Image (cartoon, rainbow, N blue to C red):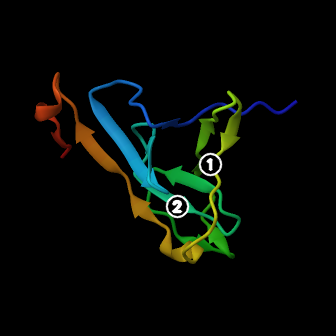
Amino acid sequence: MLTITPTAVVGENPGGDIEVFAVIEGKKIYLPAEANYVMQDRRGIWYYSKRKPRPKEGDWTPNKTSIACRSEGGFVRALRTDTVLPWLDTCQRTVRMVSGGQCAERRPAD
């Protein structure tokens, strides 16, 4: 049986000094610290990568990790949304914020 491990958290900060997230369909998706880019493939599945991906043979380069989140029912599923933009236009940088003890101390990470 295939087991999928969650690679992201929807809506709530899992903790840590640096928040790394992307906003997908109006929801804040918290990602691992090594995620620098997020992108969607032709099927609507979202991925993250450390390096800027390049298109190769009708898909993104193979060095990507699928974004898997725990759903409302408690199941871990790959994040999939309807494709609104062409898949080549979906690559975007993640947002990095340094969080302090209070919300007023939040600032963009360098």
Relative height, residue 89 to residue 2 (above, below): below
Q: Marks 2 and 1, Cα distance to the nearest angstrom?
A: 11 Å
Q: Amino acid at mark 2?
A: Met
Nearest to the eye among marks 2 and 1: give it: 1
Q: Position of residue 23 (x, y in %)?
A: 42, 52
Q: Can you identify the residue that label 2 sits on? A: 39
For residue 51, which quarter of the picture? bottom left
Relative height, residue 73 to residue 94 (above, below): above
Residue 15 visible to the viewer: yes
Q: Amino acid at mark 1?
A: Leu
Is the Cβ of the residue at disc 2 closer than 8 Å to that at disc 1?
A: no
Mark 2 packing: few (<14 Cα in 10 Å), some, or many (20+)?
A: many
Question: Which SS class for mark 2?
Answer: strand
Q: Residue 75 versus residue 50: which sits nearer the camera? A: 75
Q: Residue 72 versus residue 96: which sits nearer the camera? A: 72
Q: Can you identify the residue that label 1 sits on? A: 79
Residue drawn 43% across the image and 56% down it: 37
Mark 1 packing: few (<14 Cα in 10 Å), some, or many (20+)?
A: some
Q: Quadrant of the N terminus?
A: top right
Q: Position of residue 11 (x, y in %)?
A: 44, 37
For residue 61, which quarter of the picture? bottom right
Question: Which SS class for mark 1?
Answer: loop
Label located before the other in sequence (2 or 1): 2
